[in-house]
Every structure is written in structure tokens, then in C-alpha cells.
Amino acid sequence: MTAQAFAAVAFDETRRAVRSRLLIGSFVMCCVSSLLVVWLAHRDHEEQRRVYVEQLQAKLQLQLRFPTRVTGRTEEPGLRILRPPNPAAMLAQGETAQAPAAWEVGPAGTRALAPYSLSSTGGNGWDLETICRVFGGVLAVGLAVSSVVVDRNRGWLSVLSSSPPRPIELSIARLFGGLCTLLLLVGAWWAVMGLTLAAGWAGQALSIQRLFSLLPLAVLYVWIIHALSLAAVWGVRSNSRATPVAFTIWIWAAIVGPGSIDALGSLLEPLPTQRHFEALRQERYAEELSRVDQDIAQAAVARIRFGTVPEQDAQVEQQLRAMDAEWQQRLLGVRRLATELDDEWKTKIDRAQRLRAVLSWLAPGQLARVAMAEIATTGEAYLREWQRATHSYQQSLNRVLFDNRPIVTLTIPGLGVRFVHTQQRHEAPRFDELPDFEEPSSLATVRGAAGSILGLAAWLVASCIAATMLGARAIARPFK
């Protein structure tokens, strides 16, 4: 088969496809639904931005109130970590729908607060990535069905089987024509989105560069769905069953598969909620700290001679200082226990994420969802960076505040006497003397998307081979 004949077959495939009413309707549906979800997501982003500014102003007011000294005994709202809304969530929500809007910082560790509200989109996860995965799949399936079924009804396959080129060459040319058609349609789809965003449809928060960074993944995904649908239509030698089989593959790849993978991952590796874990850590920390206080107090009964005034008795004062040092050492032991709980939780999370990464290879829709979220900087890597930043900030505050408390109060029971001893270890710091929180970088996390992109590439190769072989068989032996 000459290059000219190959190009002619591919061009004819594209020319006939763009005239299909099903394909035109699917393209319009993709454009309209994409603009709608981005506009709704923009409304959510503006509301989240307003809430963020209000929380930031409230935090600054707390830091400037009197007194400005921090004791480190309880959670301090003036140290709260605030996560600004991510404008890329208008394209792919990823993990931002579950990511906390803020974290409280206290002696027992960080405590996640509720995520931002998604009132406009209803919190149902509809975004550009979902539209591409669902309606883009309809576009790819419609192209495969309209191409093969129409050709069978018109007897075009019988003409192709009697032509000089070999069936496998014709199959490759038709597959290439379909891929070119999808590249043209998805490119036009993204161009419409880009022009609309440039006109201010979603304000100035979302950059066009971020939108077009998702274009290669969108093209790769619809190519896979098209090749899978084409293989199914070629393989089913019945026009009445070809369309249902093709749409069944689309339903699995785009809708049922991703949901089933999430459910299966939760079943195989169940995890307690973050709120439950933080409550458990807080409870264990409080219990251990209470036990330390009781042990120190009981030791004081045997070591201190009661009936004197501590401020006038140098020996008692020396014993109190010794107990203060012992209490400080025991406090570090309690911190190690809280750290072990954190490490255990992180190990479970990492194991669950690795399991979901393996299971995601079962459905190209799940791979596309993960890859788009990572490229848009809203995926698991984005959430991990924030968790790492909050953990680092907590450790910094532990060293200078929570594990090095300015004031230690010991309640010592005695023979009908209760001594309340307050030890001023050092001057309590002000907010401006404490370490500042450093927000993580929001650069594209290509490394986090590498595994999903590799999985999509494997699906593309396998589906194209299947579509080519089944197409060659159908062209060589057309049925009436």
C-alpha cells in the first residue's frame, strides 16, 4: 500500500466522520458541558477565596490581640495553617475536594478542619476532567460506531475486501484516520475552552497554560476509548450488538471502573477516617500526659518535705526544679508516642495508595483521572506536599514551643495540703517570634503522573493492536 493510498483512506475516514450527526452532537455536548462546569467551579472558587480571606484576617487579628504571648498548652487559633483555594480545581478537583481548608496546630499535633464548600457543583466531582472522561468517551465511541456500522450497512467493507491493499493495511489506515479525527475534535474542543477562558469566563484565577497542559492526556484517553470501541465493533459481527458492546466498554472504562476501583481499594485496605485518627492521637496524648503528671506528683509526695513554704525552702525549690526537668523528659517520651502514631498512619496511607495505583491499571478512566489531577496540581502529590509542610511546621513548633513550654504547672498533693507550683522556664514567645509556615510549591507534579501516563500508554498500544487485528479480520471476511 502506497503512502498516497494510505493517506487517501485515512482522509476519507476523517471526512466521513466529521459529517456524522452523532459526532457533531457529541462535540457540542462536550463544549457546552465543559463551559458549564468550569463556570460553576469558578463560582465555588470565588466563594472559597472569600472564606480564605476572612479566615486570614481573623488569624491576624488573633495574633495582634493582647496578650500576644503563646503558652503552648492548648491549640492556638493564631497558629492555624490556612490552605488557599487551588484555582486548578476548576479543571480537575482531584484531592482538593477532600483536602482540609485549614489545620489547627496544638500540643498533640495538627488537626484537620473541614474542606472548602462546593455549593455550586454540589460536591459531586463534576469538572473538566469528568466531562472529558465521560462525554469525551461518548465522542470516541460514537466515532467508532458510526464508522464501522455505517460501512457495514452500505456494503463498503465488501468493496474494501476486494481492493488491492492488504486488509491489515486498510485497518491501520482507518484507525489512523479515526485518531486524526479525534485529534482534530479534541483540539477544537480545547480551543473553544481556551478562547472562552481568555474572554474572562472564569475570571483571571485560571491560566490558559494550565488548561492546555491537560490536552495531551485528553487526546490520549479518547484515543484509547476509540481504539477499544473500534476493536469491540470489529469483533462483534452483528450490527445490532455492536453498539451496546461498545458503550458497555465505555461505561466500564469511564464510570463503573473508577468507582469500582475506589470501592475495591477501600475494601482491601480499609482505613479509619482522618478525623478518627486525630481524635485517637489526641486521646492517647492526653492520657499519657495525665499519667506523667500523676507520676511526677506521686514522686513529689515522697521527695518533698511538706509543711513548708516552697519559696522559702531552698531544698524544696531544688526538688521542684528536679521534678520540672523530669517532667520535661517524660514529655518528650509522650511526643515520641504521638510521632509513632503518625508514622503508623502514614504507613497505612502509603500502602492504600500503592494498592489503588495498581488497581487503577484495570480501567483507563481511572488512570486518566489520576494523571489529569496530578498534572493540574490537585492530585495525591498536591495533598502529600501540604501534609508534609504541615508536619514540618508542627515539628518546628514542637521544638520551640510545645515540647519546650515556657511555663510548667505541677499540682502536688500532700498531708491535707495541695501545692500548685508554677515554674517559669523561659519567657513565652510572641507570634512574630515563632517560625513561619511555608506553603508547598504548586509546580506541576509530573513525577506523580508518570505511573498513570505509563498505564495509559500501555492501554493505547494494546487497544490499537486489538483494533488493527480485528479490523483486518473483518475486512478480509465481511459478512452480509
Image: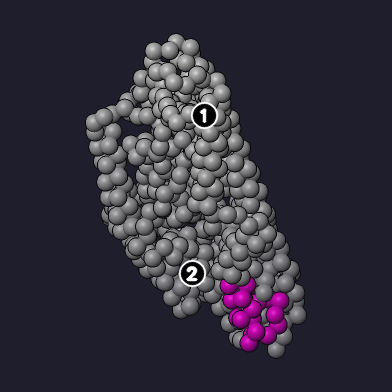
In what element is the residue under mark 2? helix
Which residue is at a point 37% across and 68% down the rendered structure image?
32
- Out of 359 and 249, give the one closest to the viewer: 359
The stretch of residues the image draws in magenta is 233-251
Q: Amino acid at mark 1?
A: Ala
Q: Is residue 239 magenta?
A: yes
Q: Where is 250 relative to 359, above or below?
A: below
Q: Residue at x 64, y 68 (%)?
A: 228
Q: Is residue 22 above or below residue 7?
A: below
Say how the picture is coloured: one colour
Q: Residues within 10 Å of mark 1 (few under 14, many from 20)?
A: many
Residue in the foreground of this view, choosing between 217 and 96? 96
**Residue to which mark 1 is pinned:** 297
Amino acid carrying mark 2 in the image: Phe
How far apart marks 1 and 2 lie (CA) works out to 68 Å
- Magenta stretch encompasses residue 476: no
> What secondary structure predominates along the stretch shown in magenta?
helix
The quarter in which the N terminus is drawn is bottom right
Q: Which mark is residue 135?
A: 2
